[in-house]
Image (cartoon, rainbow, N blue to C red):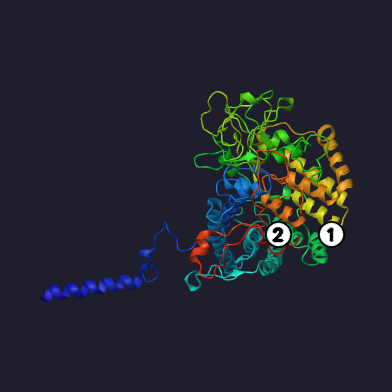
Amino acid sequence: MKNIFKYKIVLLAFVSLLMISCEDDFLEINEDPNNPLSVPTRQLLTAAEVNLAYTVANGSGGLGLYTGTVSRHWVQRGFINDYGLQGNDFTIGVAWTSIYAGILTDLQSAIAQSTEAGDLGSLGVAQTLRAYTMSTVVDLWGDVPYFEIGQGQNLEFPVFDNGSDVYDDLLALLDQAVLNLKAARDAGLLTVSGDVYSTGGNVEQWIKAANSLKLRMLNNIRDTRDVSADVAAVLADGVIQSAEDDLELGYGTSFNPENRNPGFAFEWTAGGGNYIDPFFYETMRGQDNFGHGGTFPTTPATVDPRIPYYFFNQLPSGAVDGDAENPCAYCPSDAGSPFLSIYAFSFNIDPNEGFDQSSSQSLGGLYPFGGRFDDGAGGIASNAATLLEGQVTGVGSTPQRLIDYGEVLFIQAELAEVGRGPGNPRTLLDEAIDASFKKVNEFAAIAGAPAIDSATTYRPYINDALAQYDAIGLEAIMIQKWIAQFGNSTVSYNDIRRTGFPVLHDGNADALPQTVQTRSFPVSLPYDIGNLQLNVNAPSQKVIATDRVFWDIN
C-alpha cells in the first residue's frame, strides 16, 4: 500500500508539473483547427467581395435578375413577367440572407479586427464595401435594419431604420473610409491584402472607388437636398478616371469548381431562365413597335453596334419563324433576324409564350456575361465540358462590374444637366458613351472577339446620340446610360425611379393583343417574408407599387 501511495504522489506531482510547464497552451486541445474562432481580415474581405459581386449579379439568386427584369433589360416567365414580385420569391430570400448573414457579418468583423490592429488600409476598404452594400439595400428596399444589426443574441430583433438616416450615416462612413485610406497611403501602405477586385488592393484606386460611390449616392438624393457643394468636393478629391480604375470582380473559366461569371453559369445552359426584353432589343435597333405614340423616342437611327456583343442568337442569320424549335412569341422576320424572345406582360396570355425555346432563344452575350460574340453562325449554347456538334460556348470570365468609368461619366453628365454639378453635360455624355464602347472592346479582347472600330462604326452612333441629346436633353442621357448599364441593372432601376427615364414599355398601351399589364411598376422590392415572420420589430409587408424609397420623390 505504501508503494502504491508513493506511486500516486509521484504521478500527481508529474501531472502538476506538466500542467504548469504547458500552462499557456494546455486548454487549446479543445480548439478545432478546421473551425477557427477568428478569421484573418484579408479572408473576410475576400469573402465579402465575392459575395457582394454575386448578390448584385445576374446569376441564380442574384438581384440583377429582378432589377434587370423590372428595368426591361430582361423578361422572364412567371408572375414577374407582370411585375409580380413577392416576399417569398427565391431571389429575395437568398439576397436578403446573403447580405445580412454573409456580407455585412464578414465586414463587421473585418472592421473590428482592422480597427484593433490599426490596419487603416483594410479598414478603409471594409468601410467602403459596407457603404456599397447598405446603400444598395436602401436603394432597393427603403427602410431596413442597420443601426442595430450584428449584435447577435444581445439584440436579435433589430428595428427597421429610416432609409434617409442610413444614407446619412453611410455618407459619413465613406468620408471616414477615405480618411483612413489616405492615412494608410501617407504611412507608406500601397496595397491592401485580401482585395480580389480589379483594384488589386491599390489604396489610391480604393480612394477613387469610395469617392465614386459617394458621387452615385449624392446623385440618388439630389432631389431631396442641395448636393452641389458635396458633388464639387468629391469630384475635386478624385473619382474613377479611366477603365483602369473600374471596380469589378473578374472570373475564370473553371466550371468544377464553378468560377465563371454568375450570369454565364446561369444563362448558358439549356433552358436559361432569362429572355432579352424585346423592348430593350428594339431600342438598340432604333425601333419603336410598342405603340407609345412617340412618348418613347427612338435611339439614334444608326443601329447600335454593340448588339452582337450584347446578344447571342442561337438561330443563324437568315432564320425564319419556322426554324425555331417551337412556335415563337417574338421572332421578328425583318431582314431574316434570328432574334427570339417573349414579350413582357404576356404570361399565360400569348399562346406561344409558354413553349420551350431553350435551343432557339437569344441570350445575354459576350457582354455582360462572357458568352459568345454573335458572328451570325448561330449554334446551341452550352457550358458543358464536352461540346456536341452544333453547340457553342463562351469564355465565361467577363467581370461583374460594380462601378465603372462609364457610369461615373454618366452620373456627371446627369448632375451637370440638372444644375447639381460642374461641366458640360453634352461633352460628358460624349465621353460616357465612348467609355461604354471601349468597355465592350475591353471585354471583347478577353474573348478574342473583334473590336468595334471607333472611326467608322461607333463614332457615327455617338454623333447621332448627341443630336438626340440636343433635342430631348436629360432623357437622352438616361436612355444611353440604360443601354450601357446592361449587366448592372440595379443602377438602371435607380435611374428609372429617380428620373422617370427611359419611359418603359406599357403593357396596356402597346396595341399588342399578347400583352396585358395588371400591376404597376414596383417602386421598391418586397421584404423577405422569412425576416418579417421572425423579427418582432419588422414592419408589415410593403405595397411595392406605392412604397417608395426616401429619395424617390418624383
Q: Name the residue under label 1.
A: 421
Q: Residue 228 carries which label?
A: none
Q: In this view, does 212 lie above or below 263?
A: below
Q: How many other residues sit within 10 Å of disc 1, few (<14), some (14-19) or many (≥20)?
A: many
User: Which quadrant of the figure has residue 13?
Assistant: bottom left
Mark 1 or 2: the one toward you: 1
Q: In this view, does 100 lie above or below 370?
A: below
**At which x and y percent is residue 238?**
78, 58
Q: Which residue is drawn at 39% across and 67% down?
A: 25
**At which x and y percent is residue 173?**
67, 67
Q: How many other residues sit within 10 Å of disc 2, few (<14), some (14-19) or many (≥20)?
A: many
**At which x and y percent is residue 50?**
58, 51
Q: Is residue 373 above or below residue 485?
A: above
Residue pushed farthest left?
1
Q: Nearer the viewer, residue 112 or 494?
A: 494
Q: Mark 2 points at which residue?
A: 210
Position of the C terminus, as image quadrant, is bottom right
Q: Is residue 181 above or below residue 90?
A: below
User: Which quadrant of the figure has residue 137?
Assistant: bottom right
Position of the N terminus, as image quadrant, is bottom left
Tag count = 2
Task: Give the side of residue 37 with respect to residue 199, left or right.
Answer: left
